[in-house]
Amino acid sequence: MATVAAVIASTHHPFYYRASTATGKDRPPFADEWVSKIETFRETLTRAEPDVLVMVGSDHFHQLWLDNMPQFLVGKAPKFDANWYNEEREFGLPRMTLDGEEELAAHILRSGLDADFDLAFSNELRIDHSITCPIITLRPEADLPIVPIYTNIFAPPLPQPKRFVQLGKAIREMVEAWPEDKRVAIVGTGHLSLELGGPRQFGEHGPDPEFDRKAVEWIATGDIEGCLSEVSLESLHQPGNATHGFMDFMLMMGVAGEGQKADHVDSLDLFHTMEAYFTWYPEGAPA
Amino acid sequence: MSKYLLDKFLYTVDRDPELVERYREDPAGTVAWWEAEMANRILNCTTDEKSTWLAFTEDERRALREHDHVALFEMGAHPFLTLTLFIACFERDHGPLEYQKAYGKAMEHLTLPYPDIAT
């Protein structure tokens, strides 16, 4: 059976690539500290020695569009091209091609459907920065096969927060039931408080530092119950109009499990949004 | 009112480098052309298999023609789409983050709850 080698939850900041590669006067003052935190975070995945990455993210109106919008979608293909013209334009992100792990994708689709998750699928998916940002930060070699799983945190009506948690729990069980002797890391990215295209965008900090503080605490301590008691589709409008991306963190809390304290917790207060990084080792921290 | 059609305009223009430039330089011409030629195209179908019913209201046409991102927000256009396209069009005329901050400041009179963006 497969082993869940690591569970990793992270923000996906599209400016990291440009900030970390900039030099001289183009290099922002916060870049060195950011790079240092990312390199420490990267080591938590490297030490887990994964063979395969399940990558949870959310398409930002790149391939998935309002004429045919899935709530949860699994990519099943031998290859995934990645990053889009407008991400190259705005963030300077490079084009990439990643290998797919089709057998695990097929296993997740079959067992997900049998567990009452009506998962959509795609056999030709061009993935975006919600999945390539963690490749850049956590596995820049981009040498591992992936199974991308997209969630809809973006185009209402959205699934309820509890459904994200339930799907996370199911993904954990499905990966553990995969009859292959492989080490799988489950990596998901979302947001803390965030405002895009509204009056509170691009401030000195994230739009709601108090929400961010609570969110980091919920995630770090695995407090799913506490989180679900305070977070609803309605409440997520308050911290910032793009804060529904926090539900991908809730999905990852479901993967990690109720009450499971993260083995690595870090954050970085940037302009516009707070970065946050979490790693759990279900089988104990590697030596 | 058609939030969906506003979003479709922003989405299809934002993903096409030529249309981004056209919308920056000639918004009125681009909006008129787009509504006549593109509004009823189903993106995953051949050009003959069109829709027949999609059209802007006059307020929507005006907001798009005038690059009025505040009005688009108030109409419930998806803020991510508007922001991304407008950054592509206008960030180049400003210093670092200057455009993004001014974009937010122009909306500072708006309070919660924001307009519903569900389509």
Image: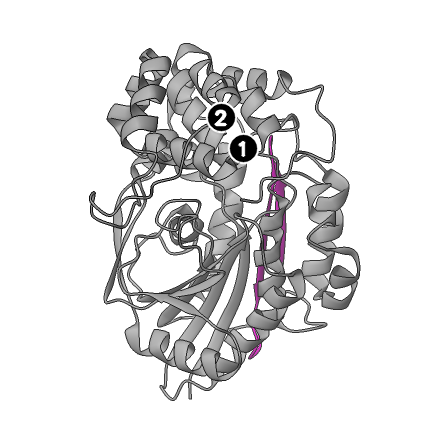
- Camera-side residue: A106 or A179? A106
Residue type at tag 2 = Thr
Kind of residue indicated by mark 1: Met
Q: Is residue A287 visible?
A: no
The overriding secondary structure of the stretch rendered in magenta is strand
Vertical placement of A280 versus B69: above or below? below
Q: Are marks 1 and 2 in contact (CB under 8 Å)?
A: yes
The stretch of residues the image draws in magenta is A265-284
Front residue of B52/A160: it is B52
According to the picture, the residue beneath numbered tag 2 turns out to be: B57
Q: Nearer the viewer, residue A253 or A167?
A: A167
Q: Position of residue A172 (x, y in %)?
A: 53, 76
Q: Is residue A228 visible?
A: yes
Horizontal arrangement in the rendering, residue A197 relative to residue A185 (left or right): right
Kind of element beneath mark 2: loop
Residue A121 image point, x, y percent: 36, 67
Residue A156 in the magenta stretch? The answer is no
Q: Earlier in the sequence, mark 1 or mark 2?
A: 1
What residue is drawn where x is 30% and y is 33%? B38
| SS assignment at label 1 | loop
Q: Are marks 1 and 2 on the same chain?
A: yes
Residue bearing mark 1: B1
Q: Is residue A280 magenta?
A: yes
Nearest the camera: A19 or A146? A146
Q: What's the chain of the residue with tag 1? A: B
The picture quadrant where one finds residue B90 is top left
Residue name at image x 20 percent, y 44 percent: B48
- Residue at 28% in and 66% down: A100
